[in-house]
Image (cartoon, rainbow, N blue to C red):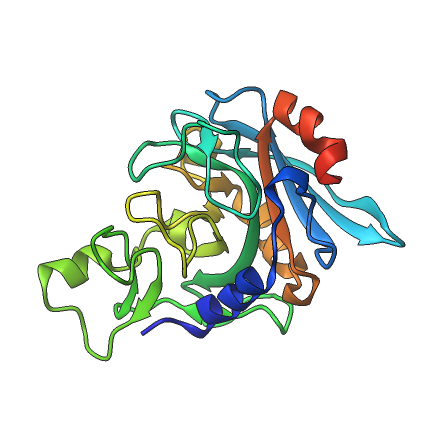
Amino acid sequence: MMSGVIRRLLAILISTTLAAAAFELPAKSSQCVVGTAKNWDTSNVTLKAFEKRDGKWVQVLAPWQGRLGRDGLVWGLGISPRPQGARIKTEGDWRAPAGVFYIGGAWGYDAQIKKNPRLAYRQVTARDLWVEDGSSPSYNQHVVLDHDPVTAWEKKQQMKQGDYPHSLKLFIAHNAPPKASPGAGSAIFFHIWRGGGSKPTAGCTTMEEAKLRELVAWIDPSKQPVYVLLPDADYAAKKAEWKLP
């Protein structure tokens, strides 16, 4: 079954009308996480957090460092338009999706976490799956089984158990349902980095645990938070047009 977190996120996505030729950040989005990388092929990212106050973006968290996909970035499937003919993220390409994405829902190992009351949080159990099988109708969805995993397929789709970097994660809505494109990439999260930041990811955005917990505590779903991830040059080129922080 599809989780309530995903259903609520879909409602936002469906209610948002995009004009590809004149995109800008959604007017109702007043929280924005910005990630900028040196170029398309780097796995290092600088992160900042902004809130819109009196119509102006104000930085509210000091910049911090994170890691991206091993092979850098590639255009993802979010709410922002993509250049015509641009390469798009695919499953297993070891690149983080670039563009603008909604943020929603947290998962982790703790029974409770510090968070906004409106942010849905799920303590992960052995019955929690995140489907990364592109042939499944539940592709890129959180699914909760009514039984312990039995089949090889169910076990393969399990959310990671006993893995510190995945002990807390925040969903980045790349290629999210109801228009999830098979094979275009799944399970993209903010989560804890590996090796104290010495290791890249398969496509997620990672950071030290303290910064992730600070980010999760700050996120307020009522402010329709978004994540902007772009190389420096592309961010500069799109800043005015897209009304970025």
**Residue at the extreme left of the image, as rendered:** 151
Q: Is residue 233 above or below residue 120?
A: above
- Is residue 61 left or right of 153 when viewed as pictured? right
Q: Position of residue 227 (x, y in %)?
A: 60, 46
Q: Is residue 136 above or below residue 186?
A: below
| Residue positioned 44% across, 62% down in the render | 107
Q: Nearer the viewer, residue 195 or 189?
A: 189
Q: Nearer the viewer, residue 179 or 66?
A: 179
Q: Position of residue 152 (x, y in %)?
A: 10, 59
Locate the C terminus by quadrant: top right
Q: Position of residue 88 (x, y in %)?
A: 40, 33
- Is residue 197 left or right of 70 when viewed as pictured? right
| Residue positioned 50% across, 55% down in the render | 170
| Residue positioned 37% across, 50% down in the render | 187
Number of numbered discs on residues: 0
Residue 1 placement: quadrant: bottom left
Q: Position of residue 115 (x, y in %)?
A: 61, 66
Q: Is residue 244 above or below residue 198?
A: below
Residue 127 placement: quadrant: bottom left
| Residue positioned 47% across, 26% down in the render | 43
- Is residue 95 left or right of 20 when viewed as pictured? left
**Residue at the extreme bottom of the image, as rendered:** 146
